[in-house]
Every structure is written in C-alpha cells, then in structure tokens.
Amino acid sequence: MPDGADPLPPLREVIAAHGLAAKRSLGQNFLLDLNLTRRIARAAGPLDGMTVYEVGPGPGGLTRALLAEGAARVVAVERDARCLPALAEIADAFPGRLEVIEADALALDEAVLLKGGPVRVAANLPYNVGTALLVKWLTAETFFWRSLTLMFQREVAERIVAPPGGKAYGRLSVLAQWRTRAKILFDVSPRAFTPPPKVTSAILRLEPLAEPVAPCRLDDLERITEAAFGQRRKMLRQSLKPLLPEDAIRDAGIDPTRRAETLSVAEFAALARAYRPSP
Ligand code: SAM
C-alpha cells in the first residue's frame, strides 16, 4: 500500500456493518470525516517512527488517519467491546502496526503498557474522561509522552491555556502550564460529530517543557492550587490559611491580599516551595 493510503470503506459503512450506534453512556460522538481525522493526525505529528497511544478509538476514524499519516505503531485502548471487530479490520489493513486493548484507560499504567520508543498521544474522548486523563498524565512523576493532542470542549481547552487574570484561569491552567507548553490548534464544529454534541470542540496540543517554569514539588503545587482556587474569590491569606501563615506568603514575595487568579504559575511554585521548602 502506498504511504498515506487508507484502503478501508467509509466510516458510515463501517458503523452500519458493525451496528455501532453511538452510546450516550460512553460519551460516544464519532468523527466520520476522514479529511478531518487526517488533519487531527497531522496535528499530532510528526508521526514517523513513533508509537501513538490512542484512547477511545471507537469505529477507528482517527486510528486509520494516524496509521495512514505514518505512525509506526498505534496502541489503542477502547472500553466498548462492540468496536473491536471494526478495529480488527483496521489492524488487518495495516499489518503489525495496530494493537487494540479492551480496557478503561483511566485504570491503565501507560509507563508499563508503552515501554520502549517515543510516544505521542492522540485522542478524541468524552470530556469528563479527557480531563481526568489529562490530570493523570500531567501529574505523573515522569512523562511517558512527547506530545498530547486531544479533543476538548472549547471551554475546557481555554481553561487549560488561560493566562492569569481571568475567570478561565484555574488549577488546570497552572498544572498544565507549570511543565508543558499548551496550545489550542483549531476548533471543531459540533456538525463534525455523529451525533453532534451541544458545544464547539477544540484540538489542544501539549508538549513537555525541558524544565518546569519554576522549581517546586508537584504534590505541593497541587495542594496549594487546590486550596487557592477552591476559594478563588477569597484573598490568599484566607484561602491558604490551613497551609501557610500570612507571613510565609509575604516571605515568598506575594501580597497575601491577592486572589488566586492573579498569580502567575511561577508565583504558585514559590508558594509551593514556601509550603514545604526543598531539603
Ligand atoms: N475516536 C473516535 C472518533 O473520533 O470517532 C471515538 C470518539 S468518542 C467521543 C469516545 C470513545 O472513547 C468512544 O469510543 C468510547 O467508547 C471510548 N471511551 C469512553 N470512555 C473510555 C475509557 N475510560 N477508556 C477507553 N475508552 C473510552
């Protein structure tokens, strides 16, 4: 097969042949336009020589695109057993390059599953699962991935990339931006999905930074951001009271009368260091 070719039937036919009516309980909104899935696959690249970890392949629109765009290997984790025969057809069309695992991605240890070469992650997931996985991947001690290219509800994507100073800036922004570069690449209209969701989606890409924005322990940063944004309207001297005395906030170079959403990521790291200075 020439590079870039996809020998399989249109996705509408695949879905009809395998009776894959979308299930709301699994957050299934399928992408049927192979031009769009190719665009997402290219956004996840470069894929040559890469293992791609795909979560929630469903009928396989993005899976096919990742393979056709040159991924050396795709490891795909799908919870819905109904999708497995359709995915097996893709594995046959791209021999030795697709491994499908029936599992709940939230329960997997990717570092063990994906041992070996460099990994890129690509996924169009239900939004709640997407956010939970993103937090799992951002809070792992070491990253098993070189890039994450993920579909999110536009509003969630905006929260991840938000700068300080606005309503969208929160815990997820700080966790993501502390040690990754996060960027919204393009929007995806509800009309692109079957069935269409209620809101616009966006493709987001995250890449690890060589070093975190400022040093601190991740668990301390999580604790501080949780407390500070848990009461985001309150001044830090109030919201951080259980963790840090007012003087310690001031000693970290931060005015205790400020509110969480005004702090930069580096200032949160300074508070995390004040909470438990490194030995
Ligand atoms: N990637 C396909 C596409 O773009 O058309 C399907 C997208 S659909 C929004 C999400 C897929 O994730 C569904 O196939 C669903 O069964 C699967 N899924 C949902 N929760 C999952 C989980 N916890 N682990 C693995 N797959 C999951």
Image (cartoon, rainbow, N blue to C red):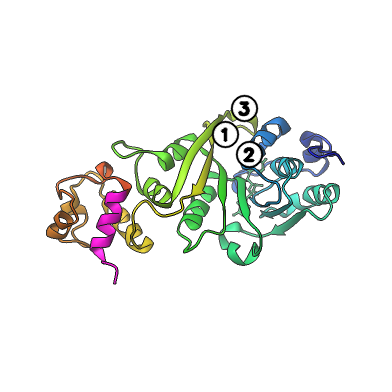
Q: Earlier in the sequence, mark 3 or mark 2?
A: 2
Q: Is residue 99 above or below residue 148?
A: below
Amino acid type, mark 1 = Pro
Q: Quadrant of residue 156?
A: top left
Residue 271 on image: x %, y %: 25, 56
| Dot 2 beta carbon under 8 Å from ligand 1 | yes
Image quadrant occupied by the C terminus: bottom left
Whether residue 164 is visible: yes
Q: Is residue 222 left or right of residue 138?
A: left
Residue depicted at x 75% and y 57%: 99
SS type, badge 1: loop
Residue depicted at x 72% and y 47%: 71
| Dot 3 beta carbon under 8 Å from ligand 1 | no
Does 277 appear in magenta?
Answer: yes
Mark 3 to mark 1 CA distance (whole Å): 8 Å
Which residue position is annotated with label 2? 29
Q: Residues within 10 Å of mark 1 (few under 14, many from 20)?
A: some
Q: Is residue 252 above or below residue 38?
A: below
Which residue position is annotated with label 3? 191
- Asked if the residue under mark 2 is in contact with the one under mark 1, i.e. CB atoms within 8 Å, the reply is yes
Tell me, for residue 197, which label it has, or none.
1
- Classified by dominant secondary structure, the portion drawn in magenta counts as helix
Tell me, for residue 98, which label it has, or none.
none
